[in-house]
């Protein structure tokens, strides 16, 4: 029997070049536990815009919330000021502290040899090279999966990674961090640094940058653990 309040919610925030469908294999296992699950759509245009989009998604919930973010989504969830958020879950994510930019933490440690070379187009937006998905973003996923990811990708703005982060919610609320030991996008050393800095409960596993596709159970279990330990019973 579900022991959480009936209106408990899990809100999932996608990362760069993605949309809410990246959580498709995570949604139903969480719903079966009795949670309302929302995949917050963020525009990837600026940290401020993305924070506002998350706020609108949180307004659709009415009870206690666990927030989970993948990659860049970690910067967005950490900036929320919603009191009903009880904990944060970082999935191979970025967690800038107040005054830091996403770029500063992303480039903190040496890039993996397979990491893609990224540059903005003439409009100031960055696209992932098609082979970047199979070589780095989700290198343990199937060929079919990475082809779909490349086809449906959404560009990110340069402004988004240059904006300084506001006060960090993880300084006052509990957090969990799934460190992807075989990540080719965000250096695992950087992930360990951020996880330790925030005092997160750390789970480390030999997974790639996108375990929502390649190690779904680990992602679901991390979120459920946060829910069990942080939501009112």
Image (cartoon, rainbow, N blue to C red):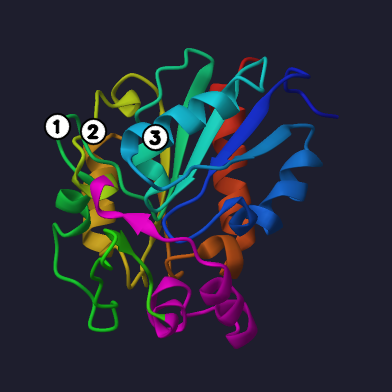
Q: Earlier in the sequence, mark 3 or mark 2?
A: 3
The residue positioned 19% from the left and 46% from the top of the image is: 162
Label 2: which secondary element? loop
Label 3 or label 1, whichever lies nearer to me, is 3
From the viewer's perspective, is residue 111 above or below residue 217?
below
Boundaries of the magenta span: 130-159
Q: Residue furthest front?
A: 122
Q: Horizontal placement of 136 versus 57: left or right?
A: left
The answer to if 145 sits in the magenta stretch is yes
Q: Which of marks 1 and 2 is nearer the N terminus?
A: 1
From the viewer's perspective, is residue 173 above or below residue 178?
above
* Nearer to the camera, 69 or 18: 18
- Looking at the rendered structure, which numbered label has been put on residue 200? none
Label 1: which residue?
99
Q: Position of residue 111 (x, y in %)?
A: 19, 72
Label 1, label 2: how far apart the Cα atoms are = 5 Å
The residue positioned 42% from the left and 71% from the top of the image is: 137
Label 3, label 2: how far apart the Cα atoms are = 12 Å
Q: Main secondary structure of the magenta part?
A: helix
Label 3: which residue?
49
Label 3: which secondary element? helix
Label 3 or label 2, whichever lies nearer to me, is 3
Quick one: quadrant of the C terminus? top right
The answer to whether mark 1 and mark 2 are in CB contact below 8 A is yes
Label 2: which residue?
165
Q: Give the quarter of the image for residue 47.
A: top left
The residue positioned 56% from the left and 54% from the top of the image is: 19
Q: Horizontal placement of 17 versus 107: left or right?
A: right
Q: Position of residue 85 (x, y in %)?
A: 51, 21
Label 3, label 1: how far apart the Cα atoms are = 17 Å
């Amino acid at each position: 029997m579900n022991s959480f309040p009936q209106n408990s919610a899990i809100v999932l925030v996608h990362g760069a070049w993605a949309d809410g469908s990246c959580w498709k294999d995570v949604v139903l296992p969480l719903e079966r536990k009795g949670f309302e699950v929302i995949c917050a759509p963020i525009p990837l245009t600026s940290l401020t815009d993305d924070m506002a989009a998350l706020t609108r998604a949180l307004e659709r919930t009415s009870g206690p919330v666990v927030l989970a973010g993948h990659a860049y989504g970690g910067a967005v969830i950490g900036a929320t000021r919603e009191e009903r958020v009880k904990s944060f879950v970082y999935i191979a994510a970025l967690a800038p502290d107040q005054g830091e930019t996403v770029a500063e933490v992303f480039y903190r440690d040496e890039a993996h040899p397979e990491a893609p070379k990224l540059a903005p187009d003439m409009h100031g937006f960055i696209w992932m090279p098609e082979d970047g998905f199979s070589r780095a973003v989700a290198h343990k996923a199937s060929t079919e999966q990475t082809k779909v990811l490349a086809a449906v990708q959404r560009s990110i703005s340069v402004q988004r990674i240059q904006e300084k982060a506001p006060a960090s919610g993880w300084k006052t609320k509990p957090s969990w961090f799934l460190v992807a030991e075989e990540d080719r996008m965000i250096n695992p050393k950087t992930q360990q640094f951020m996880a330790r800095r925030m005092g997160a409960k750390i789970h480390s596993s030999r997974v790639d940058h996108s375990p929502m596709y390649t190690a779904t159970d680990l992602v679901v279990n991390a979120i459920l653990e946060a829910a069990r330990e942080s939501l009112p019973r």
